[in-house]
């Protein structure tokens, strides 16, 4: 008799556990329903494929060029203005914090220097540094007509090969024309 009571108790405990697990899974599944993301097609302008999407909260249109040798140009369009940003990245095993110096040398030996916050993150066991630089009209003109030979984030130098520099210059031209 004790054996039957013990067996019923075990079966009840197992059924209760299974019921709790089923309820938890149902609840988790209900909360984890993915919101369908509005994906806009790649934007093609004169042979340039850009990622374009509209921010659901602000209505701002964001257009991004492909990344070329850790360089990228982005365009943000809102109701009152259009802003362009240059994004430069570099990696290192060394850690630097609160750095701001961004320097470029073009293939014609001219130089471009800006002060911009350089953020850091750890990626694959190395420090990845990123500078996000707001560009003005003069900067856009410069980047659309000159090839970058080398850039520096604080003390991290990165040489850009001629093909990548030409691609990036083309992306700047395309993104300026994109609406």
Image (cartoon, rainbow, N blue to C red):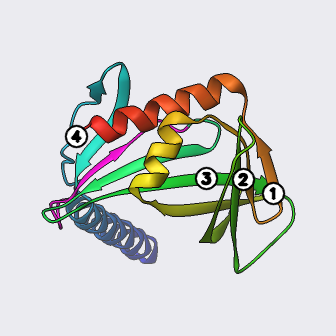
Callout 2–callout 3 Cβ contact below 8 Å: yes
Q: What number of labels is visible?
A: 4
**Residues at discs 3 and 4 in contact (Cβ within 8 Å):** no
Query: Alpha-carbon distance for marks 2 and 1?
Result: 7 Å
Give the extent of the magenta segment. 55-67
Q: Few, some or many C-alpha atoms within 10 Å of disc 2 (few <14, some 14-19, many ≥20)?
A: many
Residue, far top: 47
Tags 1 and 3 touching, CB below 8 Å: no
| Residue for point 70% across, 46% down | 110
- Which label number is shown at residue 90? 2
Give the side of residue 81 with respect to residue 112, left or right.
Answer: left
- Give the mark toward the camera: 2 or 1: 1
Q: Earlier in the sequence, mark 1 or mark 3?
A: 3
Residue bearing mark 3: 88
Disc 4 or disc 1, which is closer to the eye? 1
Residue at image mark 1: 156
């Amino acid at each position: 008799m004790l054996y039957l009571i013990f067996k019923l108790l075990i079966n009840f405990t197992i059924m209760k556990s299974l019921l709790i697990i089923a309820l938890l899974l149902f609840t988790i599944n209900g909360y984890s329903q993915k919101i369908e993301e509005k994906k806009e097609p790649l934007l093609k302008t004169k042979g340039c494929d850009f990622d374009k999407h509209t921010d659901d909260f602000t209505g701002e249109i964001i257009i991004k060029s492909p990344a070329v040798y850790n360089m990228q140009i982005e365009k943000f369009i809102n109701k009152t203005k259009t802003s362009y940003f240059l994004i430069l990245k570099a990696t290192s095993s060394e850690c630097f914090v609160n750095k701001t110096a961004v320097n470029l040398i073009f293939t014609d030996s001219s130089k471009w220097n800006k002060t911009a916050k350089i953020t850091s993150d750890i990626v694959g066991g190395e420090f990845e540094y990123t500078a996000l630089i707001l560009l003005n009209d003069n900067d856009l003109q410069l980047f659309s007509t000159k090839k970058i030979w080398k850039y520096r984030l604080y003390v991290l130098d990165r040489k850009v090969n001629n093909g990548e520099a030409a691609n990036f210059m083309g992306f700047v031209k395309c993104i300026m024309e994109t609406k």
